[in-house]
Image (spheres, grey):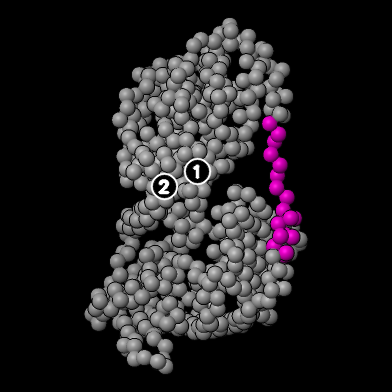
Amino acid sequence: MACFGAHWLDAASAFGQRLSRPKTVASDVAVTWLSSFFDAVSRLEHQRVTGQHGVLMHSTPIQDPVAMVGEMDGHIEGMCALLGRTPPENVIWVRGSLLSQTGVSIGPWAITDDDQPAAEFSSLDRHEIAHSVISGLCGPDQDPPRLLVEGWAQFQGNDWSAEIPGLSNQHRNQAHFLLDELIEEPWYSASRWPLYRYGGPLVAFLIQRFSAEQFLELYGQARKETFRADAERILGSSWENVERSFWIWIESEAGRLAEMKATENGIQTVVELGDQVSPGDWDSLVSHYDASQWDAVQFEKSFAFKVDVEVEESSLSEPYSRQVRVAIGSGQKWLVYQNPWGSSIGVATGPSLSVSVERSSNGLTTGFASGMEGRAQARGDMHHYLRVARRTYLSDPASEIPIGERWPERLARFRCESIRRPPPASGVGESPRIWIVQYRDWIPADDTETSTAERSGEIWLDESLGMAVKRHQLNELGSTNRSERNIGYQRLGGLILPRTVEETSVEASETLIARFELEAMTESEVASMKQEILSMADEVELPPGRPWFENVLLGASSLPLLGVCFVLFGSSPHRREADCGPMSHLD
């Protein structure tokens, strides 16, 4: 018993630190041992209320325990109806902590927390009970990835659809985890934050795209060493195709949810076309924009450049500057961004490289310097600062007009008044192909968003530069406020980068002029930049994890006494030993 107690303390420490804890024979036996031991201890500390499908144990006040048990039974019946299985009769729901354990499911035991609302069946209650139910339905011989384990509990316990807009944004910005990454260690056996966020929508997708029965079969039969083959055998589709379909579904759901939210808020998201605009011209404009792929960072396989930016504002006494240095090649991307406030940000990504660090003006270095934990962070930062180098917010017309899938920020209504298309291509030596769009839009007039301001605008888009904005004029009707922006471009490394930007705002009688100087980097400059990033990474101090033996030493002296309690007070577990499943954790 002492050995299994030590094993449990080690496992509890691993779960507390979100470390990988693969399934073993010892862990299965420890779960069975703990089930009996928990039963003994709970009889001393908790009140019990029996329901149709299990028992509620609580050490904290509950306003109506009988009604709460009824909600538990209904939750269990709903899950089992979805999965096509008979509800179990031995779920053990602990409302509060048990032996200092909170927010954890261990075999048949669903343990929540002491601070749960007295009159509410909470999301944490639903989450942990979902773990207990599916664990029992699949039996002891199960080892699903934590992506499915936490995904199922999130799907049943939380508003999983709330994660979809964020996942869609991460996917568009190339800052997402691949599902194929999340079925490998350290994610397979460790309940870490990405699994909760990705898992709920994934389980919803699997049930919608395939069936609840196939999901349950995958959950119960998949193994770490053969997961991809298991998924293809059970789902009838390769895991690669599942991932591809999942992200298509995420984008579709994000659009649907955005439309629902806009409708609820009374925002009209349909583009209005004036009398002089044919639907064919608007569709052609949108098609040319879609082909430009502004959301993706397009670049050649190997190149290096730096962009020096100097900005003059009439309201400031001195200009300020920033610099972006980029090197891409051999499957790796390296980038340093120096902002006007004296900080340097270094990012490096690659198959075995994930660095995102910042050295502030006072010399303090923070960020992720290694490991899977920082992979999505580094990937997202790389995409962000490449967009900074491109000045996408100036160049992408979707930032100003609803030409893409996303509605421009704060735009309440849009009407296209006219479209002037470039003449048909005539051959060599022709002038730039410019589209000119005149429009009116309405934006909130103040922070309350109860009234709108009407504006008229004209935007020039260069077809030869991926529909990049060449000129943008904007006038606020009913006032003297107006602005004009003109942008010159240069191609480098497969990117379309602003070379000059001149912007004038009459609203504040201010003038802003930004100058961009692009230059290829030499091999020595690239080597120096890489060394600079690695030097910053070496300066990052990562907090050490707690050694497992600390918990063992703390608990070792109490194990003999715990064994006596087990002998004197323990009864057989509420679920047969054959039905005890793995442990799971929730933050």
Above or below — where is 375 with respect to 131? below
Rendered location of residue 442, percent (x, y): 37, 71
The amino acid marked with disc number 2 is: Trp
Viewer-proximal residue among 524 and 573: 524
Query: Where does label 1 land, which residue?
Result: 183
Which comes before the other along the chain, label 2 or label 1?
1
- Please give the label number shown on residue 64: none
Give the x, y percent position of residue 305.
Answer: 62, 75
* Quarter in which the C terminus is drawn: top right
Label 1 environment density (alpha carbons within 10 Å; few <14, some 14–19, many ≥20):
many
Q: Residues within 10 Å of mark 2 (few under 14, many from 20)?
A: some
Residue range corresponding to the magenta coloring:
531-548
- The residue at 54%/69% (across/down) is 301
State the residue at coordinates (71%, 34%).
547
* Residue contact between numbered discs 2 and 1, judged by CB atoms under 8 Å: yes
Tag shown at residue 239: 2
- Helix, strand or loop at label 2? It is helix
Q: Nearer the viewer, residue 208 or 361?
A: 208
* Residue 557 vertical placement versus 201 (above, below): above
